[in-house]
């Protein structure tokens, strides 16, 4: 009988251990909010960054937002993209499933010294915001020394 009780304890312990192991794996592969709320709504737009020879293109998924609802600014060598819109559900409406909500978000990107902050271009169409960052041309730092 003691053996059976130990087996049951092990089975419960093994079950608990599997949950703990899964939480550790989730933490390593995701973020803390995803662990706490598995069904949490995606509130930060997904982003692609494409490097080209003389520029970077940042593509941000912003379904349902127009260009007027998005703010782009540069502060202290950081590109900041944000939106602060209220949800537009009518009275009495509610989501039966809600997997994304990009109405309120903020994304920050460090620009560094090689980005030309004066020539940043942005375009928003079909739910995709595309920001083009030009890379500064390298200045010639050669100094000619005259011989006396």
Image: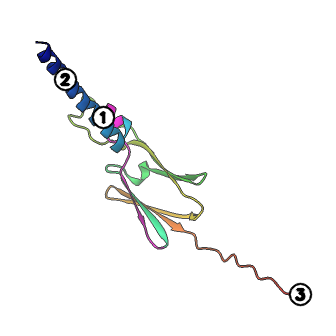
Residue 75, position in %: x, y?
59, 51
In the drawing, what numbered circle is on residue 10? Answer: 2
Q: Answer with the quarter of the image where residue 141 lies.
A: bottom right
Q: Earlier in the sequence, mark 1 or mark 3?
A: 1
Residue 62, position in %: x, y?
35, 51
Q: Is residue 103 above or below residue 109?
A: above
Point out the stretch of residues depicted in magenta. Answer: 33-53
Residue drawn at x 38%, y 45% is 44
Where does label 1 land, which residue?
A: 23
Question: Mark 2 or mark 1, which is nearer to you?
Answer: 2
Q: Earlier in the sequence, mark 2 or mark 1?
A: 2
Q: Is residue 32 above or below residue 114?
A: above
Q: For the residue labelled by badge 3, is the local secondary structure a helix, a strand or a loop?
A: loop
Q: Is residue 9 above or below residue 58?
A: above
Q: For the residue labelled by badge 2, is the local secondary structure a helix, a strand or a loop?
A: helix
Residue 71, position in %: x, y?
48, 50
Residue drawn at x 52%, y 68% is 134
Between residue 39 and residue 20, name the one nearer to us.
20
Residue 79, position in %: x, y?
52, 54
Measure the alpha-carbon separation of dots 1 and 3: 73 Å
Horizontal placement of 62 versus 93: left or right?
right
Where does label 3 land, which residue?
A: 148
Horizontal placement of 141 versus 117: left or right?
right
Q: Residue furthest top?
A: 1
User: Are discs 2 and 1 less than 8 Å apart at CB?
Assistant: no
Asked if residue 103 shows in the view, the reply is: yes
Does the magenta segment cover residue 42? Answer: yes
Asked if residue 88 shows in the view, the reply is: no
């Amino acid at each position: 009988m003691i053996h059976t009780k130990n087996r049951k304890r092990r089975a419960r312990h093994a079950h608990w251990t599997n949950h703990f192991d899964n939480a550790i794996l989730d933490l390593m592969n995701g973020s803390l909010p995803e662990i706490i709320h598995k069904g949490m709504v995606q509130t930060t737009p997904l982003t692609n960054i494409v490097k080209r020879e003389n520029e970077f293109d940042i593509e941000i998924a912003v379904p349902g937002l127009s260009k007027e609802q998005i703010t782009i600014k540069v502060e202290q060598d950081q590109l900041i993209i944000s939106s602060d819109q209220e949800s537009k559900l009518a009275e009495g409406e509610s989501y039966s499933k809600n997997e994304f909500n990009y109405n309120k978000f903020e994304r920050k990107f460090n620009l560094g010294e090689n980005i030309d902050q004066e020539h940043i271009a942005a375009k928003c169409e079909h739910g995709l915001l595309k920001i083009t960052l030009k890379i500064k041309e390298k200045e010639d730092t050669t100094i000619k020394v005259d011989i006396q």
